[in-house]
């Protein structure tokens, strides 16, 4: 592919030979001839020029180079587009496999792929261009929008609703029962979980995620939010828009997470907690039940505190051993001083 | 449905019009006409009366109301029964799907549902009224009691035994190998895991749970215990009766958990630890290997301490920054005092 | 089976009756007649002799016993071999089930078992004696070596490569997309994940594990490493040889874990962290982004510190309540002393 075509494709400004032949994208550390690479800062230009790369995607304003370059606003993103161009994700051709089972009164739109051994229960709707891959199971009355990709071995329980452009990775379970029990004469009685899960457009769910259906109402994941592998989202949780939830995070029942938040890996959120918009929560944080985290803040620790405060506490904890010695020394100084003064006083008394 | 019928159904005392028509259950925050709601305390009665709700389930002794009420001991539980009444969980009709595979010498009782593409290996037993849903896999010699519900995409390895009234959500794996290896000249050799998993009556397992088979003997989950999503239970663990294990808890090998315990989310239990009966362990606690937690206590922290102690430590950690300043001040005061006294002494000496 | 045969089998030295009939292996706490047990130390010999066990596997140099013994270097390992001998893991006979779907241009070696409803996509290779069990899904161009055991309900995404003697337990997902997004005018744009996962020989993966494919290049698990249930391994991670990763550990993107490490349960490893060889990381540790853990060290805590340091901090934290009182007392002593001295000074001045 000619470099000029790539420049047009990623809306960049081409410098150098427009006819340079690009065969593929390359790894920054060891690109081969014919490969295009990217740098996030012009500081790396010199190093990139020393490689065998055919061309370089660079940040706007990088200027002249010994190799052909494409100047763009966000080189990482432009490179991603180029990668997609050369190495598109394999997508099965629209078709319904002969072994797929489709229930009564289902509405399957055009250009849909339904893979082998997939089971679609009664009254389901699948939008255009969507893929329901092998071994996936949709309970009754599930709705899936357009351009969705349900990877193999996904379960979506009855009544759950997915919007458009949603990706759900293998092993994920949507709509299992919320964990609700009421103690009655020593044993637990199940509280029926009759709500559902609603997932809005452009959400991606990783592998082996679990999202429980609401007791009443809906567990909601709003537009553009991305959820990593092995995350747990309990009943009646609401997650806002464009929020990142990293692997192994657990969010307990009825919590609310705002828009544009980041919950780093293994964070735990207690029941009825509220995380306002634009909050970043560091890895392994613990957010107590009913706690409210304020918008635009960065939090750390378990139990969670504002980053600055917690970072100081972490540092001071590291100083505790030395500190305890210092304290002992001070106590000793004090005791010596007291006894010295007592002696002085006695001596004076003698005088 | 007439209110009188509902009152009888949940064994409550009816006040007001017995013929009030109840169409459904409602959400407390915004119920519609024809809907029944509940309040957990008479304090909320006035507020509930202002809604459009048709009737209210109230705690015993709540007394007169502007709306029809049903007085019960536990309104939340009574409401749960009503919810179930209006919105029963969909359950497939007893039948064996044409694509289900059933091995040799299996005993399948009456009124059983076996879903599409389910695989039941040789010598399995399935009790009356049980559901083995789509894509579930039972290894050889698995026994499942009566009234069980195995949701789609569950794996139960060979020789594992499940009692009656057990629910297992999608993605859960029962009986995978325990993590047992012995180092031999630099590499790990697998210790065979030839035991099984035994799950007693009335247990519920969430989605994507993993329970390992014992090395020898059995990993045991006793009667009435409820286990949430993504929980890990290692080989030879024993969990007592009516215990709640919340999401993402991990219990290491050979630990024993008592009856009526609560392990909150993301708790980690080390190998050979013992948790006695009626213990509550707070979220994200870490229980060291071989540690014993005493019955009727509440624990917090990692490593775990008794709640009162740990809560104080958490509070004091928050005070560390101020405390370090106070200490510095004290150190300074001391040094000043010493130097002042030294000066005094010298002056006296001069005298 | 005669005891002499067992002794030969586990390369041990037989003491006592070589013709003793061993029917099975027994549980150390309550073995029956005809059963063989093991002890890890000669200290337990007397106790073992009091049981009904037929024979005992003992450490080298244990010496005379009232029961027949087999002396071996590692009794636990020898016993494991004996357990395997009496109770071999059930393995399906080589065959391809009639319902298994095999794509175009696949290479299936001899003695392979492919279970019911397994789906093998185009261009896959399966080595000799391997088992791909029921409901497992292999994407296009997946390669699996010899003597592998893929348990039921495993997903392996396209292009992923597995070596020989690998075991993958049920529910595990290999090759799902790494969690890579780039923010663009307020929403996240997906960075394509076009790399793969490479798993070397003799690796075992537990149940419901998730291992993401690399963005570019490969996520790598090297020879002999064992990974427990519900572990998360992100894109471009490299895990060394003979490392143990216990349940629910999460390893973030581009981290490197060395050879012969142990990561205990629920450890979290930040992006770009490096753990050198022979490192042990205690349960629930948190390793910050880009942090390097030095070889041959033992670490604890979140954020992680060297064990000795962290153990001291944990102990000191427990002493904080008492310490705060001691400090208050010291402050008071100081204030009293100061005021006493002030009084003295004033009195002297009066003089």
Image (cartoon, coloured by chain):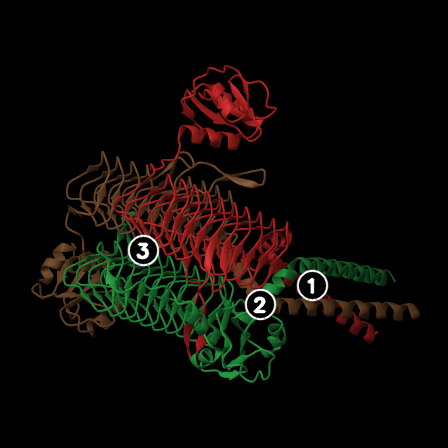
Chain colours: A green, B brown, C red
Name the residue beneath numbered marker 3.
A153
User: Dot 3, how many residues are within 10 Å of its Cα: few (below 14), some (14-19), or many (20+)?
Assistant: many
Q: CA distance from mark 2 to mark 1?
A: 32 Å
Front disc: 3 or 2: 3
Look at the numbered disc 1 and give the secondary structure of its residue: helix
Q: Position of residue B135 (x, y in %)?
A: 27, 50
Which quadrant is home to the N terminus of chain A? bottom left
The foreground one among B172 and A90 is: A90
Which numbered dot is residue B43? none
Q: Position of residue A168 (x, y in %)?
A: 34, 63
Name the residue beneath numbered marker 2.
A311
Give the image quarter of residue B265: bottom left
Using residue C38 as the reference point, say whether residue B61 is left or right of it: left
Using residue A104 as the reference point, say whether residue C276 is left or right of it: right
Q: Position of residue B167 (x, y in %)?
A: 27, 49
Front disc: 2 or 1: 2
Q: CA distance from mark 3 to mark 1?
A: 70 Å
């Amino acid at each position: 592919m000619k470099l000029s075509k790539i420049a047009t494709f990623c809306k960049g400004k081409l410098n150098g030979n427009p006819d340079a032949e690009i065969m593929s994208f390359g790894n920054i550390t060891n690109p081969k001839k014919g490969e295009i690479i990217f740098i996030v800062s012009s500081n790396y230009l010199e190093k990139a020029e020393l490689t065998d790369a055919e061309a370089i995607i660079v940040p706007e304003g990088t200027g002249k180079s010994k190799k052909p370059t494409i100047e763009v606003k966000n080189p990482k993103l432009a490179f991603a587009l180029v990668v997609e161009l050369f190495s598109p994700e394999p997508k099965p051709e629209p078709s319904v496999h002969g072994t797929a089972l489709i229930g009564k009164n289902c509405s399957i739109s055009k250009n849909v792929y339904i893979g082998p051994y997939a089971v679609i229960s009664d009254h389901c709707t699948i939008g255009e261009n969507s893929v329901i891959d092998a071994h996936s199971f949709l309970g009754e009355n599930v709705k899936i929008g357009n351009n969705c990709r349900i990877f193999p071995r996904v379960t979506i329980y009855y009544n759950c609703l997915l919007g458009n452009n949603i990706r759900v990775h293998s092993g994920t379970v949507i709509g299992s029962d919320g964990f609700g029990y009421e103690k009655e004469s020593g044993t637990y009685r199940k509280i029926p979980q009759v709500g559902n899960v609603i997932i809005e457009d452009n959400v991606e769910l990783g592998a082996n995620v679990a999202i429980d259906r609401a007791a009443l109402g809906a567990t909601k994941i709003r537009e553009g939010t991305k959820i990593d592998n092995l995350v747990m989202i309990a009943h009646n949780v609401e997650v806002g828009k464009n929020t990142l939830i990293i692997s192994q995070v657990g969010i307990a029942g009825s919590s609310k997470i705002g828009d544009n938040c980041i919950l780093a890996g293994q964070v735990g959120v207690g029941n009825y907690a509220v995380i306002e918009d634009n909050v970043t929560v560091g890895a392994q944080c613990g957010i107590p039940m009913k706690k409210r985290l304020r918008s635009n803040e960065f939090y750390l620790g378990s139990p969670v505190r504002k980053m600055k405060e917690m970072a100081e506490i972490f540092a001071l904890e590291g100083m505790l051993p030395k500190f305890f010695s210092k304290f002992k020394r001070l106590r000793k100084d004090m005791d010596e001083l007291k006894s010295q003064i007592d002696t002085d006083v006695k001596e004076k008394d003698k005088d």
